[in-house]
């Protein structure tokens, strides 16, 4: 897997699946190569969840099996396959407290997105953003909320709310995994 970094943004580009004539011997959910190594090819969703569950931050798909991950100092990296009960219990406790902190502010619904709009006025290009939702769940009780440009406080608040929503989704999935592992240890 190749990785790179630009300021506070990481990009990940896993190697592509091998062609059929280089596949090797099927074994569990991967293959044993002619060199005796195990390789597993991930679907886009599996890889996205693996990145998110491990790093604790949203992964954004770019193109051709490439993802970006923004650095988040509040994210809790997690070794999901760890079998240490004490470590997993600590992670669960930290994730629960992070969930409570994230839920203390407004969270948009899953269908809410930020759209970029452009128009030309008096010969100048004007760029602005809107928060859109199919449901009437936005703070103003409507389906659309004007956010202004990238320096506007409403825009920054909306970006923060969507980041919180994504982190909540990731943490919920991670908590379910930890609970399943801990229950399996009982």
Image (cartoon, rainbow, N blue to C red):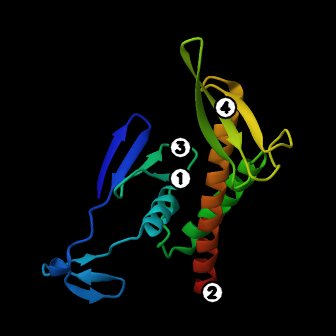
Residue identifier under label 3? 72
In-image side of 140 versus 127 (left or right): right
In-image side of 110 versus 83 (left or right): right
Q: For marks 2 and 1, give the CA distance.
A: 31 Å
Residues packed near mark 3 inside 10 Å, few (<14), some (14 to 19) or many (20 plus): few
Residue 43, position in %: x, y?
41, 70
Question: Which mark is on residue 155?
Answer: 4
Q: Is mark 1 on a helix, strand or loop?
A: loop
Q: What element carries label 2?
A: loop
Question: Which mark is on residue 186?
Answer: 2
- Which of the two labelled residues, at mark 3 and mark 4, occupies the earlier sequence position? 3
Residue at 83% x, 49% y is 136
Disc 4, disc 2: CB below 8 Å? no
Question: Which mark is on residue 58?
Answer: 1
Q: For marks 3 and 4, give the CA distance.
A: 19 Å
Furthest-right residue in view?
141
- Which of the two labelled residues, at mark 3 and mark 2, occupies the earlier sequence position? 3
- Which of the two labelled residues, at mark 1 and mark 4, occupies the earlier sequence position? 1
**Depicted 73 relative to depicted 47: above or below:** above
Q: For marks 3 and 2, give the CA distance.
A: 33 Å
Residues packed near mark 1 inside 10 Å, few (<14), some (14 to 19) or many (20 plus): many
């Amino acid at each position: 897997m190749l990785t790179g970094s630009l300021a506070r943004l990481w990009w990940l580009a896993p190697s592509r699946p091998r062609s059929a004539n280089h596949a090797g011997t099927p074994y569990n959910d991967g293959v044993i190569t002619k060199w005796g190594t195990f390789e597993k090819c991930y679907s886009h969703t599996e890889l996205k969840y693996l990145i998110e569950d491990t790093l604790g931050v949203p992964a954004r798909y770019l193109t051709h099996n490439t993802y970006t991950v923004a650095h988040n100092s509040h994210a809790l990296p997690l070794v999901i396959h760890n079998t240490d009960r004490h470590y997993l219990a600590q992670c669960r406790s930290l994730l629960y407290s992070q969930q409570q902190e994230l839920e203390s502010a407004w969270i948009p619904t899953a269908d809410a997105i930020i759209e970029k709009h452009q128009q030309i006025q008096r010969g100048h290009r004007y760029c602005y953003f809107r928060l859109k939702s199919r449901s009437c769940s936005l703070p103003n009780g409507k389906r659309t909320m004007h956010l202004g440009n990238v320096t506007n406080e409403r825009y920054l608040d909306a970006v923060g709310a969507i980041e919180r929503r994504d982190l909540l989704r990731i943490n919920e999935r991670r908590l379910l995994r930890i609970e399943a592992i801990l229950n399996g240890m009982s």
